[in-house]
Image: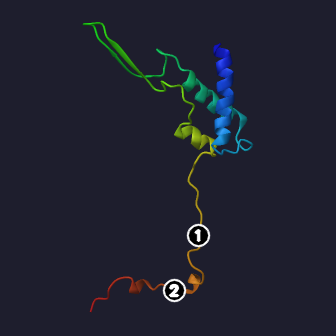
Amino acid sequence: MESARALTLLEDASQLIIDEGFDVETIAARTLTRIVCAVVKRAMSIPGGDSVTSLQQGAGPFQQTAQFANPTGDLYLTKSERRALSGGGGQQAFEITIAEGVEDLVLDPATWWPQRL
């Protein structure tokens, strides 16, 4: 039962990456595998596992409350996973031409500040 669910979630997670618009042809196979498995692990996390974000226990009337990170088992990509899928998300330099013919304009530093008399 769980293996059938896992296979379905693996297919769904793979399709999620494609649906999000990532070019899977340019992404390393190990990166895709790692991210798809992480997405499925979050969706299949079980109570008492590493998906518990908050746990309260009491001793008086014997109470216990647990809050889970993904209680509905949604498939989603984290920011770091999106960054890895998009090629690292590092900073890139680029140049934009704002106006044509500006290269002839000469700025004189002496005119930048008001002149003192």
Identify whether 64 is placed above or below 84.
Answer: above
Q: Residue at horizontal 60%, vertical 81%?
A: 100
Badge 1 element:
loop
Identify whether 42 is placed above or below 19.
Answer: above
Front residue (pair 41, 11): 11
Q: Residues within 10 Å of mark 1 (few under 14, many from 20)?
A: few
Q: Is residue 115 left or right of residue 22?
A: left
Q: Residue at horizontal 53%, vertical 86%?
A: 105
The percent position of residue 60, horizontal first and vertical second, equals 24, 7
**Which of marks 1 and 2 precedes in the sequence?**
1
Q: Amino acid at mark 2?
A: Val
The percent position of residue 15, horizontal first and vertical second, equals 68, 35
Q: Which residue is mark 1?
A: 96
Badge 2 element:
loop
Tell me the number on the disc at residue 106: 2
Identify whether 82 is placed above or below 56.
Answer: below
